[in-house]
Image: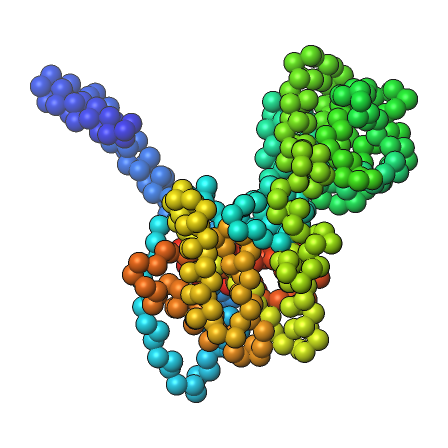
Amino acid sequence: MIRVFLVILAVVAVILGVVLSHPLLYAVAGVLALATLGWTLTDRRRRFGRRPPPVKPPTPATASPDDELKALGILEIRPKTPTRTPTDAHRPAASAEAPPAASPAPSPAPAPAPSPASFPRVVDEAPTPTVPASAEAGASAEPATHRARVLRPCLQALRAALEAHTAVLLRQRGAAPDYTIEAVASTSPDARTESAVRTAEPLPADETAGVVLCNDGDPAFPADGLPYYHGRPLVRQFAALSVARDGAERYLLVVDTLRADGLATERQRQILTGFGTLLGTLLAPASGEAGPPPPEAEAGDTDAADAADAPRPRRAIIAEEMEAARSAGHALALGLIHLNDAETIAARGPDHVAAEEDALAARIAAVAPGSRVERFGELTYGVFFRGAITAFDAWAVQLRDGLTVHAAPDAPPVSIGIALLQDRHDTPEAFRADAMDALREAYETGTCTILE
C-alpha cells in the first residue's frame, strides 16, 4: 500500500514539474521512483530467498489399517450382534466348499408387543388352575440379580429424595456382622455392588425402634467404615432401618450422607420409613411378612406336594430334567410359551382361562411330540427338549413354526423364549431365569428368542 502511495506521489511531482516549470519537482519524482523500486527489489529478494518448509514423507504402504483408522479419528470397530433365531443356535459356520443353503421361508412380520401388564406370570411352586403369581414380585421366584432390577430403582428414588450419598439394601445373617448387598444406588465410585461383606460390629438397627440415626464419632459408628464401601469415604451420618425378616435373616435399609445433619429432619425420617415399608412389601413373598402366602405357595413345598395326585413344584420338575439330561450326557432346553392376549382372556372368566390353557397345552404337545409339557403359570406353559444337540435346531424351528407361522388363523398369538442348559446353570432357578429372560425378549420383540 505504501509503495502504491509513493508511485502516486512521483506521478503527481512530475505533473506539477511540467505545469509549474520547476526542475526541483523532477528530482523529487526521481527520488520517489528510486525508493519504490528499491523497496520492491528488497521485498522480492527476502520473499524468494526463504527456504521452503520441509514436506512430510508420504505414509508408507505398510501402515496398518488400525493406524489409518486412528488417523481418521476412528478408535474401534465392532461387529453388529446378529439377531438370534431358532435356526442360529449351534449351527457351524459355512465353509467355502459347502454349497449354499436354501433360503428359509420368510416368516410373517412380528406382531406388536402387548402391554407390559399382561406379561407372563411364573412362580416357583406348583400351579393352580386360576390363581396367577408374578415371578417379578417374589425374591424366591428369581435369583438375586433379577430381584436387584426391581429394588435398585426404588433405592435410586430414595437416594434422590433424601439427597443422600448412598442408599443400600443389606441382608444380614442372624446377629453376626455378615451382610450381603442386595441392591445399591450411590454417587460414590467406591460403593460396592452385589457381594458378601463383613464388619467388626453389626450395624445399629433395631426392628422396634424404627429409624436409627448414627453420626461419625458415635460409639455405634463402625470403626472400620461402612461395609458397602471400598475403603472409608467421608460419610458423616447414616440411618438404618430394618424392613423385612426371612427366618434368621433380616433386611436392612441403610442411607448415608456426607453432611453432618443430612438426615436429621422429621420429613426425611418419614420418607425413609415410607420407602422401608415399600421395600418390605416387595420382599414380603420371600420373607413371609406381608400376610398369608399366595395360594400357589400353599400348594407348593408342602407334604401334600409329594402326594401322587398333587402337582409338583416347578423347581422340582426343572431339577429332575437337569439331572436326567446331565446323567445321560444329553442337551436340555426349556422353552416358555405365553399367550399374549392374557388380559382379554382373563377378563372372560376362569372357565375361559382354563379352556385356553388346555388348548395351548394341546397345541404344544402337537407341534413338539415326545417333549415334556408342564404348566408354568397363568396362560404360560413350559416345554422341555432333551436329546442330541444336533436335533435341537429342528425342534426349535418346529416349535416356532407350529405355534406362530403355521398356527390356525383364530389361534391367540404367543411369545416363545428358550434357554439351553449350560455349565453355569447350577440351580433350577438359574436355568429358569434364563428362560424367563428369553421370554421377556420374545415378548418385547415379537420373535422367538433362544438364550444360550
- Residue 53 to residue 392: above or below: above
Left/right of residue 351 with respect to residue 185 in the rendered view: left
Closest to the observer: 19 or 333?
Answer: 333
Where is residue 435? Give x, y as percent.
Answer: 56, 58
- Residue found farthest to the left: 19
| Quarter of the figure with residue 203 | top right
Residue in the image at 21% along x and 24% along y: 9
* Coloration of the structure image: rainbow
- Residue 170 to residue 441: above or below: above
Left/right of residue 182 with respect to residue 218 in the rendered view: left
Residue in the image at 24% along x and 26% along y: 5
Where is residue 364? Give x, y as percent.
Answer: 46, 66
- Residue found farthest to the bottom: 97
Residue 373 at least partly seen = yes
Closest to the observer: 170 or 413?
Answer: 413
Where is residue 314? Give x, y as percent.
Answer: 63, 57
Where is residue 354? Give x, y as percent.
Answer: 46, 53
| Quarter of the figure with residue 275 | top right
Left/right of residue 262 with respect to residue 35 in the rendered view: right
